[in-house]
Amino acid sequence: MPVIVNGVELSDADLEQELPYHGDAANPQRRAITALVLRRVMLDEARRLRVSGASDAAIIDALLDTHATSPEPDDAACRRHYDTHPERFTVGELVEVDHILFQVTPQVDLQRLRERAEAVLQEVQAQPTRFAELARALSNCPSAAVGGSLGRLGRGDTVPEFERAVFGPPAGAVLPRLVETRHGLHIVRVARHVAGRLLPYSQVAPRIAQALAAASRDTAWRQYARMLVGRARIEGIELEGADGLLVQ
C-alpha cells in the first residue's frame, strides 16, 4: 500500500535512498518510511511558513530553530543535575568483579535456568570460597577460565544494568540477588572497590549545560514533529505512538 503525505506519494526511489541510514533499526523499512514522512511534513510546514534554505536539511534546521525552540538551562538546573548524578562526574572509580553467567539463549527454558542460577547463588553464599570453582564449572562466559574474574571495570566498561549493580554495594561480598542483563543471569562478587574523585562543579558546568540544552532541544523537536504529524494527512502508515518518531 502506498504511503501518501499531504497528497504526495512517497516514491520507491526515496525509500531506497533512505533505507541505508536505518540498517541498525529493528525494522529498517518502517524507520525509513517514518523518516521520510517526518521530512515531508516538515518541508510542507516550512513552505507554508515561508522558511527557506539552501537544501532540504537546511530548511528543516531553520524551521526547528525558529519554531521548536527550547529554554537554555540556568546555573541552578546545572547544579541540580551535578548534585543528583555525582557518579557521572567522578573519575578514576574502579571495581574488581567476579561473576558466574547463566546465558539466556533463544532455546533456553528461562524458568529452569533461573531456578538453577538461584540454587547456585545459595551454594555460593553458603560457601564463598567455592566461587572460583563454580565459575570454572558453570559460567557461560570466557572469564570462567580464570574463576569468573572480569578484572578491573570502570564506569562505561560494561552494560548499564551490570554497571548499576556492581558500583553500588560494598566490596568483599556476593550480591544477594541475581543480576539480570541482556546477556543473562549473573551471580556477582565485588572483590574490590576503588573510590574515584568527584570533579569540581566549575570544571564540568559547561559540559552539563551543553548536555541539558541538547536534551531540552531534542524534547522540543520531538513534540513539534508529533504536532506536525498529527495535523498532516497521512495514508498508508499509522504513526500514532510509532517507535522512532524522531527528527532525522
Image (cartoon, rainbow, N blue to C red):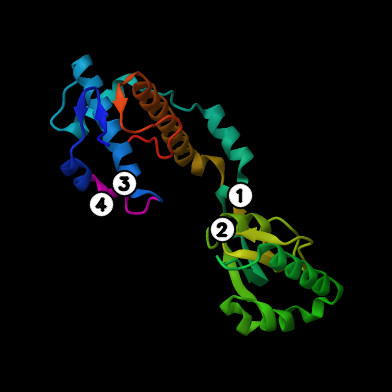
* First in residue order: circle 2 vs circle 4: 4
* First in residue order: circle 3 vs circle 4: 4
Asked if disc 2 and disc 1 are in contact, CB closer than 8 Å, the reply is yes
Structural distance between the alpha carbons of marks 4 and 1: 37 Å
- Binning the other alpha carbons within 10 Å of mark 1 as few (below 14), some (14 to 19) or many (20 upward) gives some
User: Nearer the observer, disc 1 or disc 3?
Assistant: 3
Q: Which residue is mark 2?
A: 155
- Residue 7 visible from this viewpoint: yes
Badge 3 element? helix
Q: Which residue is mark 1?
A: 87
Nearer to me, 110 or 124: 110
Tell me, yes or no, whether the highlighted magenta stretch contains residue 170.
no
Residue visible at 20% across and 47% down in the picture: 16
Main secondary-structure element of the magenta-colored stretch: helix
Which amino acid type is marked by label 4? Pro
Structural distance between the alpha carbons of marks 2 and 4: 32 Å
Residue visible at 57% across and 34% down in the picture: 79
Residue visible at 35% across and 25% down in the picture: 229
User: Percent x, y for residue 57?
Assistant: 21, 34
Structural distance between the alpha carbons of marks 3 and 4: 10 Å
User: Percent x, y for residue 178?
Assistant: 72, 62
Q: Residue furthest top?
A: 49
Structural distance between the alpha carbons of marks 3 and 2: 35 Å
- Binning the other alpha carbons within 10 Å of mark 2 as few (below 14), some (14 to 19) or many (20 upward) gives some
User: Percent x, y for residue 207?
Assistant: 45, 41
- Residue 195 visible from this viewpoint: no
User: Nearer the observer, disc 3 or disc 2?
Assistant: 3
Left or right: where does residue 37 sit relative to residue 13? right
- Which stretch is magenta? 18-25
Left or right: where does residue 137 sit relative to residue 143? right
* First in residue order: circle 4 vs circle 1: 4
